Amino acid sequence: MKEKLQRSISASNAPEPAGCGPTLPVHANMKPLRQQVFESVRAAGQISRIDVAKNLGVSPGSVTQMTAELISMGLVEEVETPSQHLRGRPPVALSVKVGAGYVVGLKLGDFSHSAVIVDFAGMQIAELDCPSAARKMEADALIDEAEALWRAILDKSAVLPKQVAAVGLGLAGMVDHDAGTVPWSPLLRERGVDLRALASARLGVPVHIDNDANMLTLAELWFGAGRGKSAFAVVTIEYGVGMGLVLDNRLYRGALGLGMELGHTKVQLDGALCRCGNRGCLEAYVADYALVREARVALDMPPDKAGHVGALLETLYDQAKAGNEQARTIFRRAGRYLSLGLSNVVHLFDPELIILSGERMRYDYLYAEDVLAEMKSLTLDNGRVAPQIDIHVWGGYVWARGGAALALSAVTDTMFGEAAEA
């Protein structure tokens, strides 16, 4: 890898692109033409009929027919666009109709939960977060918290429950998206929970669930840096370590929907204990609880006086910046293990972009030049172009926005699938 690694850093206040959803076409697209037209309009924000026809490679007449049907369905509307001409009819573009429908995204976390409401165009209507009662609980108790979050975001937005077409819900752990079950999660005491059925029954709307790293990857694919990328990976570092992967412009989940568990790949035989119960997982060296475990020793702090994980990590980071060599060693060691994990991602998937995301990316030790240089040294040097590395210091709401993207995708497939059958 002779080319220099590219690295960029961005925050959640970066300007959003127009529209939402992937901007690249999916190969072997078997979706109905009407759905393709709708998704093309949604991705562009505003677009003319002729440009839709060019993007999809179909005749303008076909697009005119499909847009007429979408307008009659109340999903698309015509909007006038600015023109330099003083005479004649103003140019007309298509956009998703304001208020056509809404979806909710929920993210359940170890210490806090977050929620957003977006409309069918991807415009965010409201957002909120609240603390979690506990990190590990019974399934019914977790659904209680999800319901409270659901009711709070509806109250804040003034959107009625009947106006919500679907909910996208994400949480850490192994989540079978297709089956709607959670084989294991650090938030749940039970295993094999049918979380989709429980949540759908409680909220009274269709609920779609996924791993939280997949949700963050969907947020990048629908709203962020991945909209125009056909292959990219998102590595998340917070209380756990997760990964999402997009191949051929689509989220890849694996044969059974349980793939991309980068945090539980092994980097040390008989190594540190991971919260999944196994030893030697990458997460056990990089995640919040791994740093805290060593910070208590480095800062000579008894467990009963350790305080909140976030506060302890901030203290550790401040100590490292102030020159405390023990604190620096903890971050340096975590960075080395992270470089090993990233090198494995490059070898396995060869992505054009790797996004390092999550609250812990505020700690620059985890993406320092020596970390990326070690990743380069661990990767086969065959002359190929190195992947770009982006660091996104997102706030908590981006995870919930990924849930909204999950819901939007499911609603669109259902809506046009039912229309095609009718």
Image (cartoon, rainbow, N blue to C red):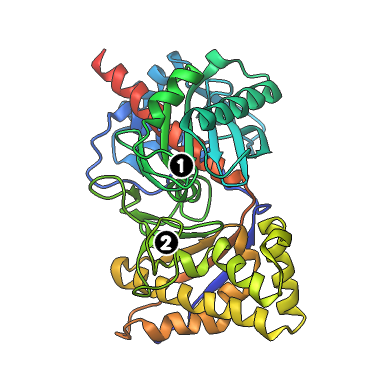
**Disc count in the image?**
2
**Which element is circle 1 on?**
loop
Residue 235 position within the rendered picture, expressed as x and y whole percent measured from the top left: 47, 61
Q: Quadrant of the C terminus?
A: top left
At label 2, the amino acid type is Gly
Is 166 drawn above or below residue 334 in the view shown?
above
Determine whether label 2 and label 1 are within 8 Å by CB. no
Residue 391 numbered mark, or none: none
At label 1, the amino acid type is Gly
Image-quadrant location for residue 210: top left
Q: Which residue is mark 2?
A: 263
At a point 70% along the width and 71% down the height, the residue shown is 316
Is 181 drawn above or below residue 319 in the view shown?
above
Is 62 drawn above or below residue 302 in the view shown?
above
Which of the pair 87/282 is nearer the observer? 282
The crowd level at tag 1 (other Cα within 10 Å; few <14, some 14-19, many 20+) is many
Residue 163 position within the rendered picture, expressed as x and y whole percent measured from the top left: 54, 16
At a point 42% along the width and 48% down the height, the residue shown is 173
Is residue 90 something that shows in the picture? Answer: no
Which of the pair 278/4 is nearer the observer? 278
**Which element is circle 2 on?**
helix
Q: Quadrant of the N terminus?
A: bottom left
Is 336 drawn above or below residue 225 in the view shown?
below
At a point 61% along the width and 66% down the height, the residue shown is 292
Q: Which one is earlier in the sequence, the residue at label 2 or at label 1?
A: 1
Is residue 201 something that shows in the picture? Answer: yes
Q: Which residue is mark 1?
A: 21
Residue 68 position within the rendered picture, expressed as x and y whole percent measured from the top left: 40, 18
Q: CA distance from mark 2 to mark 1?
A: 27 Å
416 displayed left or right of 356: left
